[in-house]
Image: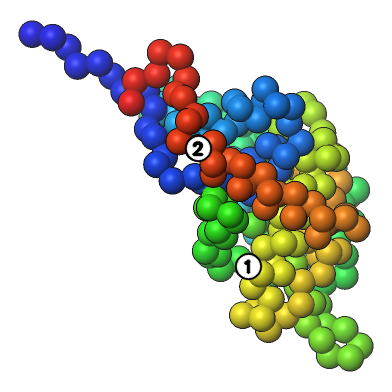
Amino acid sequence: MLQETKKTHTEVKQPQISVPRLADYMAASEQAKRTIAQSCKYRAIARVVQHDEAKAAISSHMLDGSKGIGGLKERAEFIRNKLADDDFEADVNDHNADYIDQFCKVVAAIKLPMAELLPVTPFKPLMLNGVRVTFIPQLLLRRKTKTNKIKSGALMLRYAKGKALPERVAGFQSSAIFGYMKTIEQAQMAEAERELCITLDAYTGTCHDAPGKAAYFFKEMKAACETLAERWPAIKPPKNAVL
């Protein structure tokens, strides 16, 4: 009896990309763009290390208004020493603990704008010229002006072990945050503000707010999404992929 070939990837029929991946895409070379687009259309079934626990721990810490590292070191140790069912799960725990440990080293350098930090409620994906762009920030920011206008923004965490987030990538990601918040500002009864749209590099502690060219960058992202949507049907799966 023939053994069934194990599937390696699933195909995403409709164009879709996350805000961080779109930022990576915008700053990438043409060859790297093809690789990113391919990875978005053909999702690997193999488990991928995620930093969900680290992001949750850090965002909770920031929401609590804790000074310094607070209980983050203890949280990192708890995650690192959790019982794991297999080597992969143990590796995920180590990566999340490392993420928090690095954040603890740079937390003193983090300079956030004067604003209220709020928990996130789920955001619907944004359709940009045929591409479904998912947006999952870690925190919302809000402040009131002297004339009682409400200004709003959001913060997203980025982390790569051993290296800083490239400034160009951060600029595009914060511009995407600003662009998204601009599209929903009426529904939120608040006006999006560039300085409150932040990509926080957890490796260096650098807060990258949306640049002065954020509106232009967002238009560039819209144009890139249109091209991506047009190319989507022609994107081929990775070599030796089994769908």
Q: Quick check: 65 above or below 93?
A: below
Mark 2: secondary structure: helix
Q: Which mark is residue 119?
A: 1
Q: Which residue is mark 2?
A: 232
Q: Quick check: 194 above or below 25?
A: below
Q: Classify 10 Å Cα crowding around label 2: few (below 14), some (14-19), many (20 and above).
A: many
Residue at 45% in and 14% down: 239
- Image quarter in which the N terminus is found: top left
Residue at 67% in and 52% down: 222
Residue at 86% in and 46% down: 206
Mark 1: secondary structure: loop
Disc 2 residue type (three-letter): Trp
The CA span between labels 1 and 2 is 35 Å
Disc 1 residue type (three-letter): Pro
Question: Is residue 98 visible in the rendered structure shown here?
Answer: yes
Q: Nearer the viewer, residue 216 or 40?
A: 216
Labels 1 and 2 touching (C-beta < 8 A): no
Left or right of 77, for residue 177: right
Quarter assignment of residue 183: bottom right
- State the image coordinates of residue 62 (x, y, percent, origin top left): 73, 60
- State the image coordinates of residue 177 (x, y, percent, origin top left): 71, 58
- State the image coordinates of residue 82 (x, y, percent, origin top left): 50, 36
Q: Nearer the viewer, residue 238 or 226?
A: 226
Q: How is the image coloured?
A: rainbow
* First in residue order: circle 1 vs circle 2: 1
Q: Nearer the viewer, residue 221 or 223?
A: 223
